[in-house]
Image (spheres, rainbow, N blue to C red):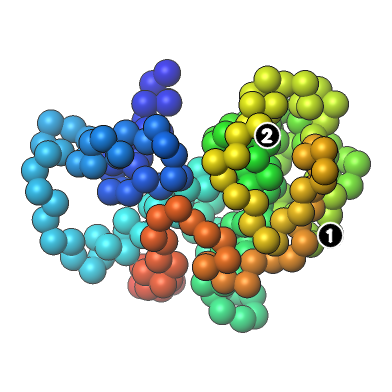
Amino acid sequence: MHLVRQKYKIDRTCGVNLWGRDKSPFNKRPHRPGQHGTRPRRKLSNYAQQLIAKQKFRYYYGMKECQFKRFFKNAVAKRGDTGNNMIQMLESRLDSIVYRLRWAPTIFAAKQMVNHGHILINGKRVNISSYLVAPGDKVELSEKAKRLGIVQLSIENHDRELPAYLNLSDDKLSGNLVKLPDDIVEVGYPCNMDMLRVIEMYSRSM
């Protein structure tokens, strides 16, 4: 329960409804958590804006700082635009795919599903959340996962749209990554996400 409360504080800390949830506490209490949270937010420095931009991405994908920074370094090392590389890598993570396919109500539940061995890729069980799914890979639920109540409820919930770069089978029990997203706009985050500020922040220390 303590962990759940921590997750619900994230929206208020970042100042946005990060996952676009109807029950987000930010919808009713748009101020920061804590006894001084109701005080007006001061004008943020450039560094503070960069930090919040980074934290929004990190929280959104449920990643630790070391994991997120490692992804960024890999994005820099790849050819092409660093921002787009980063978005494509984040969106091709297995836990992200499970969340996008609406098999889990939250990114955190998606991680648990992967970690507990409920997801198959091309017929083989994969239990690593950060596994990068390649375009064309078939991702499907295990037989046990198909019977889980949380999965059935999530599948029946239509509060999130399926991105165009993903395909879902008619029975909604398998899908695949059709292609990598072209840019941040195609992902369709429920709030404003600024990858440029993330790049600016990490570029200072690399």
Name the spot of residue 161 as percent of width and height, x first. 60, 50
How many numbered discs, if any? 2
**In this orientation, does residue 63 appear?**
no
Q: Identify the residue at image location x=70%, y=61%.
A: 165
From the image, tell me which residue sits under label 1. Answer: 136
> Left or right: 2 with respect to 80?
left
**Helix or strand or loop: what does disc 1 sit on?**
loop
Image height of 109 relative to 140, above or below: above
Q: Position of residue 149 (x, y in %)?
A: 68, 20
Few, some or many C-alpha atoms within 10 Å of disc 1 (few <14, some 14-19, many ≥20)?
Answer: some
> Does residue 54 appear to the left or right of 29 in the view shown?
right
Q: Is residue 147 above or below residue 191?
A: above
Look at label 2 and name its amino acid: Ile
Q: Which mark is residue 155?
A: 2
* Residue at left offset 64%, top offset 80%: 79
Q: Do we see residue 85 in this rendering?
A: yes
The answer to the question of whether label 2 and label 1 lie on touching residues, with beta carbons closer than 8 A, is no
The x, y position of residue 175, in whole percent, is: 79, 48
Judge depth for marks 2 and 1 and give the one in front: 2
Question: Which numbered tag is attached to residue 199?
Answer: none
Q: Amino acid at mark 1?
A: Gly
Q: Position of residue 172 (x, y in %)?
A: 77, 39
Above-or-below relation of 30 to 192? above
Residue projecting furthest to the right? 123
Residue 11 is left or right of residue 39, and the answer is right
Above/below status of 155 relative to 149: below
**SS at mark 2?**
helix
Picture quadrant of residue 34: top left
Left or right: 65 with respect to 158? left
